[in-house]
């Protein structure tokens, strides 16, 4: 189990191929090779991939859950309402749907976290999945690119988009495979969590010492 999703891996592969594309274009011009690479990158970025997982919130120490129409970050490990269906769409863009509730995690025009039964055309239920500088996962709204999924650390309720930032703990997450086997899975998860914290501290120390 790790913090990197299938979307991240696809993005990495596509980036490598794009570099090859640019290199080939600059040296041999537009040809069959570069066209094939371009088509393959386009295919990778457009192919939908679905993963059943749990999304751990650093601010609450629990998981995102969708119960009926409400979303919070108060879900216990292994709870049926904490299992999410994360589907990658176009390049880096994902949707998050509660497996049990059947509802999508979305953001309203005012930046409030809500849920919907069906995907809408206004991109309110689509988010860009990124790795933060501290090696966590953040989700930026596809509709408003200054807003992020975030949760209050005390109440577990969603934060309004205008009050969020990818650098806030409230907006940082770790993706967990839903099939984590009991205590062994928890041990692996906590180990990854400690590695992330150590990396974050080292990064901050480096900033102040250089």
Image (cartoon, rainbow, N blue to C red):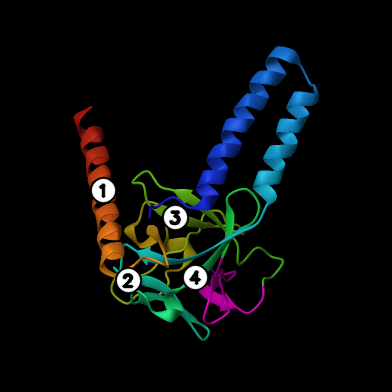
The residue tagged 4 is 84
Please state, as top left, top right, bottom left or bottom right, where the N terminus lies in the image: bottom left
| Mark 2 or mark 4: whose residue is earlier in sequence | 2
Check if residue 100 falls in the magenta segment: yes
The nearer-to-camera label among 3 and 1 is 1
Tell me the CA gap for discs 3 and 1.
17 Å
Q: Which residues are magenta?
A: 96-118
Check if residue 60 falls in the magenta segment: no
Between 19 and 147, the residue placed more toward the observer is: 19
Tell me the CA gap for discs 2 and 4.
14 Å
Q: Residue at x 79, y 21 (%)?
A: 30
- Classify 96 as above or below 67: above
The residue tagged 2 is 62
| Mark 3 or mark 1: whose residue is earlier in sequence | 3
Residue 75, quarter of the rendered image:
bottom left
Crowdedness of circle 2 by 10 Å Cα count: few (<14), some, many (20+)?
many
Q: Residue at x 62, y 66 (%)?
A: 124
The residue tagged 3 is 138
Number of disc labels: 4
Crowdedness of circle 3 by 10 Å Cα count: few (<14), some, many (20+)?
many
The residue tagged 1 is 195
Tell me the CA gap for discs 2 and 3.
16 Å
């Amino acid at each position: 189990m790790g913090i990197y999703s299938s979307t991240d891996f696809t993005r990495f592969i596509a980036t490598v191929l794009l570099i090859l594309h640019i290199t080939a274009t600059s040296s041999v011009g537009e040809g069959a090779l570069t066209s094939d690479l371009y088509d393959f990158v386009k295919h990778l970025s457009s192919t939908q991939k679905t993963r059943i997982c749990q999304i751990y919130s650093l601010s609450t120490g629990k998981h995102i859950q969708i119960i009926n129409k409400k979303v919070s970050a108060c879900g216990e490990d292994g709870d049926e309402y904490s299992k999410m269906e994360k589907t990658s769409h176009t390049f880096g863009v994902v949707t998050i749907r509660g497996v049990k509730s059947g509802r999508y995690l979305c953001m309203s025009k005012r930046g409030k976290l809500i849920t919907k039964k069906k995907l809408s055309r206004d991109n309110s239920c689509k988010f860009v999945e990124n790795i933060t500088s501290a090696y966590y996962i953040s989700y930026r709204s596809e509709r408003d690119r200054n807003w992020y999924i975030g949760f209050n650390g005390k109440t577990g309720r969603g934060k309004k988009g205008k009050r969020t930032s990818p650098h806030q703990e409230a907006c940082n997450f770790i993706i967990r495979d839903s099939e984590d086997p009991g205590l062994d899975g928890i041990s692996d998860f906590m180990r990854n969590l400690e590695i992330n914290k150590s990396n974050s501290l080292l990064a901050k120390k480096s900033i102040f010492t250089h």
